[in-house]
Amino acid sequence: MIHNYTNQDSSRLKQVSKPSDLIDGYDRQITYLRLAITDRCNLRCRYCRPESGVPFIPHQEILSFEELEHLIGIFCDLGISKVRVTGGEPFSRRGCLPFLSRLRQLKGVESLHITTNGVKTSRHLDELAKIDLDGINLSLDTLDPKTFWKITRRDYLASVLETLHGVLERGIPLKINSVLLEDTSDGEIIQLADLAKNYPITLRFIERMPFSGVVRPTKLENGHLAERLKKVFPAIEEQTSTLPTTARIFSLPGYKGKIGIIQGYSRLFCQTCNKLRVTPAGMLKTCLYDNGALDLKKMLRSNADDNEIRAAITSCVRNRFANGHEAEKFSGRALEPSMANIGG
Ligand code: SAM
């Protein structure tokens, strides 16, 4: 059954305007921080993490909420205005919701978002709506229960769909992220895209990236995602954007929402990349593919003062790689074993 959600309004998506002092050597202004608050997750998506064999980071090695809030204050002083809380699965960490409420109050955080797999999220939606969260990115790769099990090794599709509809009901801006795998059929693509046909959301297909030991690229990871979509949806039309964006967005006649692609493997959006990441263990990454640019936890726990931390962050940003290919080339060791250790 298709519901009519009248309170989903994409104009609610705030454009953050505050200029940032964080500018890299390629004139990219950094305004966006992705903060992974845990490496724990209640799914085991086969492209993300093996069922076992990737040990969890010991609790004491994960930044405490106090440390995270302290850091966000420093980042906002420097010019960050958009914060996304991610993981692992953010709601796998106890205290995530009160943390989000406190972030909402933090000076400088103009725009607050989360990325979630939706498994445990529905129970928190009233509170998330109350704090006026600016957006939820929900990860959902299939609408078929058997395929969901095959991909995630868990049986939680019903809970994820409950979250999806709960988000729409409450009018929280929603984007859905779907990793496209080599065996994703055209039928599944159409089924997922129907979510954007029926609801005012953006459904983004993501190229699989070489984390979790999967390195062998398929045709899809080599820039063919747009071609595949054009084949499935001949009437698709690309939209232009002047804003920094990782996604290429397309409209389709008769669709309430939009379809997008994120070419994280091809790395075609690095020129406009405006983000930094902090991993659950407190490592600053200036690129998804770098090796960690700065050990923020070490600085915090050795009582470095805020000026020193600010200067170290600014210096890392200045030395940022031109793009993800360079970052990977110079990272000097194998990439992370899972996106959950980085913060997707
Ligand atoms: N647990 C939350 C979730 O599922 O949205 C947040 C963390 S998860 C690591 C963030 C995103 O990274 C998800 O959309 C997931 O599908 C994506 N991801 C994980 N591993 C990936 C990979 N190897 N290639 C592409 N995307 C990946």
Image (cartoon, helix red, strand yellow):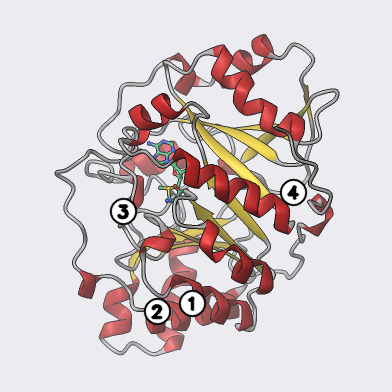
Q: Secondary structure at mark 4?
A: loop
Secondary structure, mark 3, is: helix
Answer with mark 4 or mark 2, whichever residue precedes in sequence: 2
The amino acid type of the residue labelled 3 equals: Asn
| Dot 3 and dot 4 residues touching (CB under 8 Å) | no
Dot 2 and dot 1 residues touching (CB under 8 Å): yes
Q: Position of residue 160 (x, y in %)?
A: 50, 45
Residue in the picture at 65% in, 53% down:
167
Query: Is residue 224 visible to us here?
Result: no
* Mark 2 lies on residue: 65
- Residues at badges 2 and 3 in contact (C-beta under 8 Å)? no
Above or below residue 145? Residue 269 is below
Q: Residue at x 72, y 41 (%)?
A: 201
Q: Is residue 267 left or right of residue 197?
A: left
Q: Is residue 109 left or right of residue 138?
A: right
Q: Is residue 247 visible?
A: yes
Q: Nearer the viewer, mark 1 or mark 4?
A: 1
**Reading the chain from its start, which is encountered first: label 2 or label 3?**
2
All told, the count of numbered labels is 4
Using the image as rendered, state which of residue 225 and residue 28 is in the foreground.
225
Residue pointed to by mark 3 = 341
**Does 323 sit left or right of 253 as displayed?**
left
Q: Residues within 10 Å of mark 1 (few under 14, many from 20)?
A: some
Contact, mark 1 vs mark 3 (Cβ under 8 Å): no
Q: Are marks 1 and 4 in contact (CB under 8 Å)?
A: no
Q: Is mark 2 within 8 Å of ligand 1?
A: no
